[in-house]
């Protein structure tokens, strides 16, 4: 049984800590029951399941640490894991950036566990896939998609009295539909914590419509265009910028936030004043985790407010080094962006665009220059020319070279945020987005 | 003695195991207690018998012991040491014409039989919507056999202190040579895989890989600018001897560029050069955008090969199995069937293999028990082959797998992954310096950098580590802000010269990603320095 209750998890953690002879000991325990189903060519291809439970012990002797993992839970195994971590700590080099274990934390209580997801069966997965495939077959389209679901718990404790327990469920579905002649392709995705909200057929209908609309794409000249980035297109660039907002790299002079003379852009306006970017574990649409990778409690953090950089992420060591309170300085972010928007739906946003390109998805996004946060990548699975507020015709895909910082300075309008890829992102209208070449890919 | 089984400590999100951010030293309690071959056979038979009894028409089992070690440092500090071991078994079956898969870390005959039953149940559920029953290319059982990477020194047996000292020595060299920051890592992998199938194969393999790498950074506080230079080492299918810095495996620099490496790597020399070169990049000339003849070193060209030849000729992409994630391919079946699709210039020949010594892809058998081989992909510029697994061969009217099945872990299902795909060196004697002599206006690129390609593998953009301007056959100084964009077919047809075998070197990726859920695999690509005419170079400098 991989999904332990709070009391079961606490008992194992406390038993493990009782074996410790080190200066400090931290233990974490996690379990997951997960399944997935993949389909392509309108039929199932592969699928699998897993049921896992494991425990990690970290022991510290002075400034030296070692960790061990195990997935057997009798007393002898737990003690052996502790002894092994202690042995490794003795063998490890001293870490000059060692930080002592954190003390007890007050964690928020995000509600991320839903029984409907925890109870998903292989038959459910097959049913969702069948709905998606059926929709495509009726329209002479070919579906390729992926469904994955999981129910997880995690717990942590240490010799300083820290304890935490949380559980969550997740379900993700995405589908690419292609016309039989290979000249049209559409994509849509959805992710939830509550599986009862998943409508695989509805998601597929969006992708199917895009596939049918994207046939007979015309080539238009690459260059600078006003773009409407759907949330599924904008999400990666926004998250990449958030992840790069790192205090240490900024202070060391090797971040896009670094400035001449050792100064930084923290506290300065770097993008349009309508841009607000934050993370918040308590957002009901995007419930987060109680703690981050170092055990500190997760709180709402405003990263960009009114276009101004309000915060950058600190490891515990760097917070101490810079004389900051580690509980006030936010840990470095990793995705889960929430970007503020408006109530304007996508259709209405499109109506306001005189001449531009509607982008469904950006693909193969890679860093080109960390100095300016320049990225390259391509449009994919539904790219359309918009004129006088209407989608006129599909266009061939483009390669872009653009920085999210420049892009968010060129903001024209924001729409209603939507959850995609574990983030909440609005559709965005942006002027002068740089398309540098054409791609023949469909 | 009761056996301990362990999971990798690579979980993410909420379920991840909490390890200290500054160091990740994970022990593997079962490290001294591998399973005996006889025991693995007994377990494998338990799985195969259970699956067959429940109606599977085919079954295979992979019992894996995966060792991973990494050491990370920055400047004169050790940031982390991670050593993980993972034991378990994955069982794949065909029932009702559909695949089913289930994995367990409980290695007893009972639990492995239960996992086999789960795999059969999943296959039967899937069969309800299966419209293309799985057909396997025949594969004669090979009986009981074994294969191991021919290493001289097992990196896992080398004391941790030696690895730490090497990295810190490289960091010291880079700092002394002018770097402000340097991060270095050493990665070691050992896959101990036992494969058995209902075809009658029992294959025990011991596979080793190693990857030393670093990033040197030079900052200029006056301007706020910074530049980096990453190592030009290739990850390798070798043991710890790869770090011996054997001078016989160095290639002399062309003019005032950099030393290049083939079968052995000099970490300290490269770190020293990297710091000097990162410093030079800060004040290097920003490239003028336009068309240039490109001269591409093997440490760079491997990645262009990987993206534009390797991925484009994966048969699962061509057939649409990867349409939702990695994409499809422009190298469609009609182009292959025509027998005259000019993928590249007539001098361009690509071969695929899983046999090159020192390559990341080298194994004796793939993950469905097929013996490995070498075969042509592009011959005299024409598309002639793909990369296939057993369940794909019949779709293209063939009767044999190419041995391209791989899974990253016992808990993941195997599927088609890229073998080594390499460019044949030119037949006539030609060294890089001689090749450059004939270039009037060009850019010489060493090392891999930014990379991006579309989902059908037409349009690509690549950066690099070192860029040198070529003027009238001479190296004329360093450039920065360079990326080139092209179209796969156009690019390979513009190939106007390939150096000879003396210049051949492997590059590669430790973590090539594909599939849903995503899996990584390691793959090498060999080439000699090659020239490409009139390629579009863009300037990537921006102001924010």
Image (cartoon, helix red, strand yellow):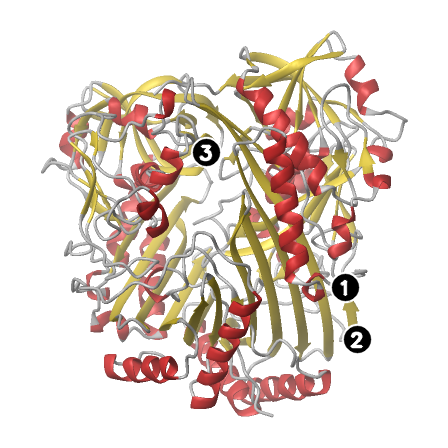
Tell me, for residue A109, which label it has, or none: none
Crowd rating for badge 1 (residues with CA inside 10 Å; few <14, some 14–19, many 20+): many
Asked whether the residues under the numbered discs 2 and 3 touch, taking CB atoms below 8 Å apart as contact, a structural biologist would say no
Q: Is residue B303 above or below residue B1?
A: above
Q: Are marks 2 and 1 on the same chain?
A: yes
The residue wearing badge 1 is B364
Tell me the SS state at disc 1.
Answer: loop
Front in this rendered view, residue B277 or A195:
B277
Which part of the image, by quadrant, shows the C terminus of chain A? top left
**Disc 2 and disc 3: Cα gap in Å?**
45 Å
Observer-side mark, 3 or 1, equals 3
Corner quadrant of residue A229: top left
Front in this rendered view, residue B119 or B522:
B522
The residue wearing badge 3 is A367
Give the residue furthest to the right.
Answer: B429
Numbered disc total: 3
Percent position of residue B258, x then y? 72, 27
Tell me the SS state at disc 3.
Answer: strand
Q: Is residue B160 above or below residue A13?
A: above
Corner quadrant of residue B13: bottom left
Front in this rendered view, residue A418 or B7:
B7
Percent position of residue B368, x then y? 66, 68
Q: Are marks 3 and 1 on the same chain?
A: no
Q: Is residue B426 above or below residue B22?
A: above
Tell me, yes or no, if residue B36 can be seen here.
Answer: yes
Crowd rating for badge 3 (residues with CA inside 10 Å; few <14, some 14–19, many 20+): many
Judging from the image, mark 3 belongs to the subunit labelled A
Judging from the image, mark 2 belongs to the subunit labelled B
Tell me, for residue B145, which label it has, or none: 2
Q: Earlier in the sequence, mark 2 or mark 1?
A: 2
Front in this rendered view, residue A86 or B6:
A86
């Amino acid at each position: 049984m991989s999904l332990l209750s709070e009391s079961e998890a606490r008992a194992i953690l406390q038993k493990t800590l009782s074996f410790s002879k080190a200066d400090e000991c931290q233990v974490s325990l996690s379990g997951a029951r997960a399944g997935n189903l993949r389909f392509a060519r309108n039929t199932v291809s592969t699928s699998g399941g897993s049921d896992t439970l494991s425990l990690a012990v970290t022991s510290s002797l002075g400034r030296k640490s070692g960790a061990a993992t195990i997935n057997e839970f009798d007393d002898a195994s737990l003690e052996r894991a502790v002894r092994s971590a202690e042995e490794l700590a003795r063998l490890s080099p001293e870490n000059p950036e060692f930080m002592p274990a954190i003390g007890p934390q007050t964690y928020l209580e995000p509600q991320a566990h839903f029984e409907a997801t925890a109870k998903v069966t292989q038959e459910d997965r097959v049913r969702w896939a069948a709905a998606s495939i059926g929709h495509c077959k009726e329209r002479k389209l070919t579906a390729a998609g992926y469904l994955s679901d999981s129910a997880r718990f995690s717990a942590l404790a240490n010799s300083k009295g820290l304890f935490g327990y949380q559980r969550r469920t997740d379900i993700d579905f995405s589908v690419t539909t292609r016309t039989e002649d290979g000249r049209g392709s559409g994509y849509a995705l959805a992710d939830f914590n509550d599986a009862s909200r998943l409508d695989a057929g509805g998601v597929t209908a969006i992708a199917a419509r895009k596939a049918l609309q994207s046939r007979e794409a015309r080539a238009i000249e690459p260059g600078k265009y006003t773009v409407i980035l759907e949330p599924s297109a904008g999400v990666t660039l926004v998250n990449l910028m958030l992840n790069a907002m790192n205090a240490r790299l900024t202070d060391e002079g090797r971040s896009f936030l670094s400035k001449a003379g050792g100064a930084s852009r923290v506290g300065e306006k770097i993008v349009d004043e309508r841009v607000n970017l934050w993370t918040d574990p308590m957002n009901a649409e995007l419930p987060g985790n109680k703690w981050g990778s170092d055990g500190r409690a997760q709180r709402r953090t405003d990263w960009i407010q009114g276009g101004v950089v309000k915060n950058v992420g600190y490891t515990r060591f760097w917070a101490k080094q810079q004389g900051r309170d580690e509980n006030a300085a936010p840990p470095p972010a990793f995705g889960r962006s929430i970007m503020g928007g408006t109530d304007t739906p996508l259709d209405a946003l499109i109506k306001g665009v005189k001449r531009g390109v509607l982008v469904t998805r950006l693909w193969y996004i890679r860093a080109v220059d960390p100095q300016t946060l320049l990225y390259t990548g391509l449009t994919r699975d539904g790219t359309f020319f918009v004129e006088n507020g209407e989608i006129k015709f599909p266009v061939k895909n483009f390669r872009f070279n653009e920085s999210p910082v420049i892009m968010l300075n060129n903001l024209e309008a924001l729409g209603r945020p939507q959850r995609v890829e574990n983030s909440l992102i609005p559709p965005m209208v942006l002027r002068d987005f740089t398309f540098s070449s054409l791609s023949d890919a469909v | 003695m009761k056996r301990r089984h362990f999971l990798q400590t690579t979980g993410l999100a909420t379920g991840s195991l909490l390890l200290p951010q500054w160091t990740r030293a994970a022990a593997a309690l079962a490290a001294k207690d591998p399973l005996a071959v006889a025991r693995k056979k007994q377990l494998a038979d338990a799985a195969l018998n259970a699956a067959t009894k429940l109606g599977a028409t085919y079954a295979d089992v992979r019992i894996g012991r995966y060792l991973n070690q990494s050491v990370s440092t920055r400047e004169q500090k050790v940031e982390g040491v991670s050593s993980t071991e993972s034991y378990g078994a994955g069982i794949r079956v065909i029932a009702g014409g559909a695949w089913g898969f289930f994995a367990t870390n409980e290695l007893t005959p009972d639990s492995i039989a239960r996992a086999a039953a789960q795999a059969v149940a999943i296959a039967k559920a899937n069969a309800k919507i299966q419209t293309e029953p799985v057909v396997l290319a025949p594969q004669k059982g090979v009986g009981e056999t074994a294969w191991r990477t021919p290493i001289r020194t097992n990196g896992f047996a080398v004391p941790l202190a030696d690895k730490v000292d090497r990295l810190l020595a490289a960091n010291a060299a880079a700092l002394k040579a002018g770097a402000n920051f340097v991060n270095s890592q050493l990665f070691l992998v050992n896959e101990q895989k036992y494969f058995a199938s209902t075809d009658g194969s029992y294959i025990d393999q011991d596979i080793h890989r190693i990857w030393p790498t670093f990033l040197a950074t030079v900052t200029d506080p006056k301007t706020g600018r910074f530049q980096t230079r990453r190592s030009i080492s290739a990850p390798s299918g070798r043991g710890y001897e790869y770090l011996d810095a054997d001078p016989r495996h160095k290639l002399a620099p062309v003019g005032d560029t950099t030393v290049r490496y083939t079968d052995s790597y000099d970490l300290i020399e490269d770190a020293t050069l990297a710091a000097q070169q990162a410093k030079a990049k800060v004040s290097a000339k920003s490239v003028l955008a336009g068309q240039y003849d490109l001269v591409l070193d093997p440490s760079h060209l491997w990645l262009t090969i990987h993206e534009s030849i390797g991925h484009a000729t994966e048969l699962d992409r061509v057939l649409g199995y990867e349409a939702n994630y990695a994409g499809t391919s422009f190298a469609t079946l009609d182009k292959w069937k025509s027998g005259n699709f000019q993928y590249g210039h007539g001098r361009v020949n690509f071969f695929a293999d899983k046999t090159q010594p020192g390559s990341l892809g080298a194994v004796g058998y793939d993950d469905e028990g097929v013996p490995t081989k070498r075969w042509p992909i592009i011959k005299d510029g024409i598309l002639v082959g793909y990369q296939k697994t057993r369940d794909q061969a019949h779709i293209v009217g063939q009767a044999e797998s190419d041995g391209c099945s791989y899974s990253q872990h016992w808990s993941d299902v195997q599927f088609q992954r890229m073998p080594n795909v390499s460019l044949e060196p030119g037949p006539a004697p030609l060294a890089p310096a001689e090749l450059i002599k004939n270039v009037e206006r060009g850019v010489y690129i060493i090392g891999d950098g930014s990379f991006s390609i579309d989902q059908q593998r037409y349009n690509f953009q690549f950066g690099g580590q070192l860029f040198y301007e070529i003027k009238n056959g001479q190296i004329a100084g360093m450039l920065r802000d360079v990326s080139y964009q092209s179209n796969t077919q156009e690019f390979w047809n513009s190939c106007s010269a390939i150096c000879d075998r003396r210049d051949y070197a492997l590059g590669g990726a430790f973590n090539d990603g594909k599939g849903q859920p995503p899996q990584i695999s390691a793959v090498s690509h060999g080439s000699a320095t090659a020239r490409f005419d009139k390629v579009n170079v863009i300037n990537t400098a921006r102001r924010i």
